[in-house]
Image (cartoon, helix red, strand yellow):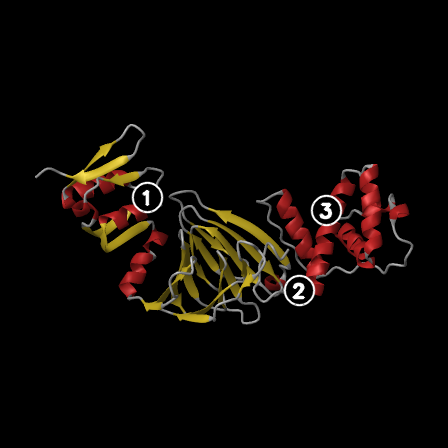
Amino acid sequence: MSNIYPFPNQADKAQITNDDSLDQACLWISRIDRELNQVEKGELKHWLEQNPQHLTDLLEVANLWDKMDELSRLSDLFPKTKQTAPKTHFGLYAAASLFLLVLSAWFILDYSNNHTQPEQNILATQTNYQTKVGQNQVIKLPDGSELTLNTNTFVQVKFSENRRIIDLHRGEIHIQVAHDPTRPLDVLAAGQKIQAVGTAFSVQMKKDIVELLVTDGKVKVEQTQQKTASSTQTIQSEPVQFVAKGEKLDLDLTGKTAKEIEKVEDADIAAKLSWRSGNLVFRGETLAQAMAEIERYTETKITLEQNDTLKNIKVAGVFKTGDIKGLLIVLSQNFNIEHQTLADGTIKLSLANS
């Protein structure tokens, strides 16, 4: 499971070993459910004899999924040792949740304890969310946090008794984190770990940069350990940095540029996050920069004529995401820029003849 949630503090080896055993137990229960062949029966017997914990975990998973009858038919494979009655615990739920996720990437697990309050019900869940190009989505998470996905974004969200994880695979998110000092929320993005307790911030994954913008509170940033190309040594984590409200940090994934925290004006923050209301606000960006941003919200490709004057025209205004027709009208009327639609649907911009 550590390869799915690469926590930089490296959970103790005993817990990792137990989690692996639970994963294997889940796998064996799924095989037993569709009946084992003779080779698999031998493999199961060998696995059970390797460690007494394996039988305990197998019984626990079977009890959870009501598969004890199937196990009883295979009792002759069990080691001749006394086993105590299985006890359900968090690790079991987590392993079962991850196993089922492999079978169905969009299946949402929500286990609850009937003897606790509603807000404590969730023991272990993992859920995938994604948006298409040009789409955004607001998600209310079980802890009360609000997660907003920008265009073409994919995240995995995991909640457990002591962790809240958002694994950003691509795109951009903004999150308003519900305060819970006993259970920090981590955003993982390309080897970067951003941790918050109760705050608000946005994270965008670019080609070589993870861009962090904090809109409320403070977050902690650290780089998770990564292997070198040869996988023979580990790159040590960089010092932890703290980024506060109104500050931005570009995390250079190439390691070529030092990480420096920048102050951001309120107006620039509002422009940066205008996508949440379906708009794009430009405040003097070049036409080349503006078109690159607009392209994120549409399947239509936009190219610029090889003309430095054209590329460096300063653009200011509010554009509706995905409204290419409206964009072309504004460029024509306000910036004297004409367009041509090529055979493959690409729109080519050029300066209009005076």
- Residue sticking out furthest to the left: 354
Residue 264 or residue 206, whichever sits in front: 206
Residue labelled with disc 1 = 295
**Disc 2 designates what residue?**
116
Task: State if disc 3 and disc 2 touch (CB < 8 Å).
Answer: no
Residue labelled with disc 3: 27
The residue that appears at 53% across and 57% down in the rendered structure is: 228
2 or 1: tag closer to the N-terminus: 2
- Tags 2 and 1 touching, CB below 8 Å: no
Which badge, 1 or 3, is on the more N-terminal residue?
Answer: 3
Secondary structure, mark 3, is: helix
Q: In which quarter of the image is the N terminus?
A: bottom right
Mark 2 residue element:
loop
Residue closest to the eye, 173 or 81: 81
Residue 156 placed where, x, y %? Answer: 53, 52
Q: Report the Cα–Cα distance between label 1 and label 3.
A: 43 Å
